[in-house]
Image (spheres, coloured by chain):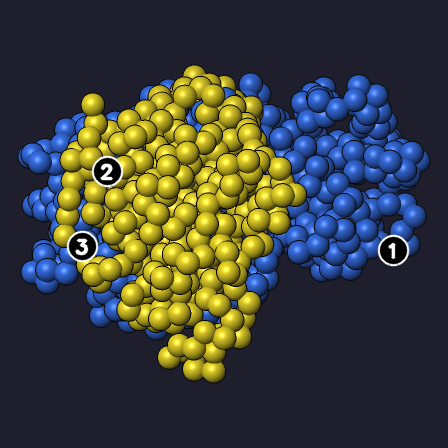
Amino acid sequence: MRDDTMNVLIGGEAGQGLVTVGQLLAKSLVRSGYSILVTQTYQSRIRGGHNSFAIHTAVDKVIAPQESVDLLVALDAETVALHQGDISSGGLIVVDSALEVDGDSFLQVPFKELAQDTFSNIAALGVVGYLLGLEQGLMATALDDFFGRKQRQVLEENRRVLVEAMAWAASHERSGHQLPKIANPVQHLMMSGNEAIAFGSLSAGLRFCSFYPMTPATSILLNLAAQAKRMGVLVEQAEDEIAAINMAIGASFAGAPSMVATSGGGFALMAEGVSLAAMTETPLVIVVAQRPGPATGLPTRTEQADFEFVLHAGHGEFPRAVFAPGTVEECFHLTRKAFELAEQYQGPVFVLTDQFLADSYRAVPPFDVEHLAPVKVGAATAGSLPYKRFAVTETGISPRLLPGLSRHLVVSDSDEHAEDGHITEDLSVRRQMVEKRLRKGEGIRAQVVPPEMDGEQDPDLLMVSWGASKGAVQEAASRIRSGGKRVATLHFSQVWPLVPGQFMDLLESADTVVSIEGNAFGQLARLIRRETGFYIKKQVLRYDGLPITPEAILRDVSR
Amino acid sequence: MVTIEDYGQYETAWCPGCGNFSILKAVKQALVASRLEPHEVLFVSGIGQAAKSPHYLNANLFNGLHGRSLPVATGAKLANPKLTVMVESGDGCNYGEGGNHFLAAIRRNIDLTLLVHNNQIYGLTKGQASPTSAEGLVTKAQPEGVSSAPFNPIAVAVAMEAGFVARGFSGMTDHLSELIQEGIAHRGFALIDVLQPCVSFNKVNTFAWYKERCDPVSRTYDPTDWEAAMKVAREWGDRIPTGIIYRNDRVPFEEHVPVLRQGPLVGREVDRVMLRNMMDGCK
């Protein structure tokens, strides 16, 4: 246990209000100027089971989750049983005094007494807040903001419980967990990956979002729905995912920047629609928040196993781009970029995340949204007349007019079509059209976000990763580096197209290359092999439903 | 003044004698009678011989996937409610592959006009049973005869209290054209199921078969009487009632949605100050 960083894990059953405690504690930490990284684990049930909300917090920027727990808040006995082994030396377990426990590492709190049965979670919040050295006034304000809309009485009782719990903790002093104070903290936003995608899409000019609920993508839609009226966005729950993607395509065709968000199973139903967006050259952003499959898999856990699926989904050949944000900031900016590319190249663009990142709250600096331009929709002019929606051009990009906004008729077809958009079986036109569509891929390639390289030149060890594992890999690298080894990381936030010129030198200069992925096939590694011939033999693969952590990487890499 | 010539005349991929020709004519007549110019109209279609119809007239067109014309039309109409959106496809497309969307479209009640070319057979794939094929109909794919009961779109739509439910027949072009015109004028979802022969693959439900049976509802028939409509909707035998079977004045979806009261989604600016304020809520 270090004194400038803390890993707090709150565990309990669904329905005990542990997410509320977690969010309030996280908010109080962010407002106090600390960095946070939240890992949420939950089960596919509304009540019971074991859920956890872990906050890795520090004075300096936190980039990865941590397995060892410095402060465990156990709202039930099962949490103790499951996590006792993870307690760091000097760590503390906060439990209800009714629980029979033994040892120095426990702080037994009379929750029932403090909380009068109803607000145990707030009592736990007060105790933990005190232990971490958070200010009472700041925590009370966080409570007010959270319960602001509820009854005044509930708010006052919560406040009273918070104050009493903090007082109780003060009189049962257990020092050693206070974070160093930050004077005049800079105000950051507390934002999850899914929230950042929602805000990124709004900033890019999203107008239409159709969805069918599916964990862990749903909170993107909930965030959008909450802001839809004020932002002039229509969010519609479709009858199924097939309808969702087709609606979004219809809306986009008519000129409303559109997005769908789902997870693997829902995306499977959308696959034909992906192909339709490509053939009709309709801009569309598709967010796939991964969870473990096959089929229903582990509905609430995390994995990176749908990359190959997303890369190949949709019949026929067409260009696409796949972004894989590694941080909450990247969720925002790459979603914006996805809208820009979709509009510019008129087709499907993907944002591939996972449950870990989707649900992970972080402290992020405010985005400069006033200076971030939304996408420009459609072409300004018809080009050569008569207007041809699919005019063959050098770049493959044809002027996209919007139906009903001019006297020109806009015709699109899922069948192979001529330049005017009407169905054709002229096979020379077919050839021209395939080539026109594929030429757009060259433009997409020219705009690829290069992989991020970090660390030593000519490294002994190069760790290759993509998506949400970014921080964990960088953290692991820095620990190995402090052991004296030359280490570098190569992290992909755009996983398609790959541009070998951007990373081959580094791959070839390393003594050992290891790929680190949240799947069982090593999907990025085999894509790199397919595209470049470079074979990454050593792999650290995680597919147990939990996020990749620095500890997990170190265990495997050193093997 | 818009004329039928504005909607053009094109060579088709249909068999001589196909019901689609008269339906196409009725559609053009209805658009002209509705005083709609081609650029004000968006056709959305699926896959099948019926779905090709909008290629043979001048208008905006999105010819999408099999079964998925309603969701595409839904998205387009919501993005720009100023467009007159016509959905045109066959019985297989709308009642089979797209069945769920048919139910959802009735529930949503968006201002769309759905034209279903219903020939009780799959034409494009050469003669398999459709959801509306009669029980016992023998095809190459159902050599022992169709064993499922036919789908009755009119009864389903009336049962769900769809805003506008009509049945036409391709052999009664002027009558059909009037129905389409009424469907376009109706504020909300309008279903027009159009019976038509398939000269190549349906040797039972022929032009003569329909002509003998299709019979407009009487002048005194009240389509706002739901119980009477349910009765008429189930009539299918020696007489097949045509005309407006049921209608009501349910408020269309667009008028429920506050975002759309501010105008079309298309062309709106992002309120960046509002966005900044909302993101500040994360502080």
Query: Who is closer to the viewer here, B153 or A529?
Result: B153
Mark 2 surroundings within 10 Å by alpha-carbon count, few (fewer than 14), some (14 through 19), many (20 or more): many
Query: Whole-percent x and y of residue A12?
Result: 76, 49
Q: Which mark is residue B59?
A: 2
- In the image, the chain rendered in yellow is B
Closest to the camera, between mark 2 and mark 3, is: 3
Question: Which callout, 2 or 3, points at the residue further toward the start of the chain?
Answer: 3
Side of B180 relative to A198 (left or right): left
Query: Whole-percent x and y of residue A241?
Result: 48, 52
- In the image, the chain rendered in blue is A
Q: Which mark is residue B12?
A: 3
Q: Secondary structure at mark 1?
A: loop
Mark 1 surroundings within 10 Å by alpha-carbon count, few (fewer than 14), some (14 through 19), many (20 or more): few
Q: Which mark is residue A102?
A: 1
**Which three-letter amino acid code belongs to the residue tagged 1?**
Asp
| Chain label for disc 1 | A
Q: Report how far apart the C-alphas of labels 1 and 2 lie in the structure.
A: 79 Å
Q: Which mark is residue A478?
A: none
**Which three-letter amino acid code belongs to the residue tagged 3?**
Thr
Side of A26 relative to A484 (left or right): right
Q: Report how far apart the C-alphas of labels 2 and 3 lie in the structure.
A: 16 Å
In the image, are marks 2 and 3 on the same chain? yes
Query: Whole-percent x and y of residue A206?
Result: 39, 33
Side of A115 relative to A323 (left or right): right
**Which three-letter amino acid code belongs to the residue tagged 2?**
Ala
